[in-house]
Amino acid sequence: MPDETGRRGFFKEALNQLIQPVAEFLDDQISDHLPAEEPGNRPLFRPPGALPEAEFLEKCHRCGNCVKNCPANAIFPLQTTQPDIANTPYIDPEEQPCVICDSLACMYVCPSGALQTVYAEDIKIGLAVFSAETCLRTKDVDCTYCVDTCPIGEDAIHFTSDGVVEVMDTGCTGCGVCQYACPTAPKSIVIEPIAK
């Protein structure tokens, strides 16, 4: 009579071999569609056109319209145990920056007025702050990612005559594309909050 324990072990192992790749695939698929984690100690950036924080929190319906309609998938509902900010929309440049899309859809689908309609050049999510210490350009590497990827262009960021990165406060929208594109670790350019 065959050893039942051995047969069970064989079939269990065979089943694991079949299920493991499927489980990994599904896990990847689910992870790709989950909202980003709560930023924790990182600054909280709101979508384009957001009112000052206190007013934004008062008006925002947490409806998810801006999240669903963002063509860049850059807006996430905040997953947190803090009820006053739970499910409010935010942008994490480390996950996916705002690309200042042509449609600026998030502003137009907001039913509460928490996101106001503004021109692309008037968007102020934050402000890019450059650090020369870690920048590859200070190590004789001709890196141009931050300038090349900026959706606003030279009005927001450019190189000085010395080849140093310069952020223009008046033109930078704080979209986070430069931070996302920067290849250094830690990043040589990061978005910081601005007082509203």
Image (spheres, grey):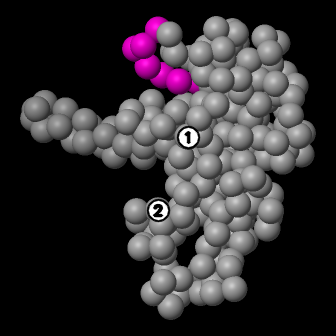
Viewer-closest of 93 and 27: 93
Q: Which residues are magenta?
A: 76-83
Residue 78 lies in magenta, yes or no? yes
* Residue 101 visible, this orientation: no
Residue occupying the point 25% across, 42% down: 13
Q: Amino acid at mark 1?
A: Pro
The quadrant the N terminus occupies is top left
51 inside magenta stretch: no
Front position in the image: 40 or 3: 40
**Predominant secondary structure, magenta span:** loop
Q: Earlier in the sequence, mark 2 or mark 1?
A: 2
Give the residue at x 41% y 73%: 133
In the image, which disc is placed on residue 193? 1
Vertical comparison of 110 with 6: above or below: above
Q: Judging from the image, what secondary structure is the residue with disc 1 in? A: loop
Relative vertical location of residue 140 with respect to residue 184 in this rendering, above or below: below
The crowding category of the residue bearing disc 1, from other C-alpha atoms within 10 Å (few below 14, some 14 to 19, many at least 20), is some
Q: Is residue 156 visible?
A: yes
Q: Looking at the image, is 24 positioned above or below residue 154?
A: above
Labelled pair 2, 1 in contact (Cβ < 8 Å) = no
* SS of the residue under disc 2: loop
The percent position of residue 143, horizontal first and vertical second, equals 59, 80
Q: Nearer the viewer, residue 135 or 21?
A: 135
Tell whether 31 sits left or right of 149: left
The amino acid type, in three-letter code, at marker 2 is Lys
Disc 2 marks which residue?
187
For label 2, the crowd category at 10 Å Cα-Cα, with few meaning under 14, some 14 to 19 and many 20 or more, is some
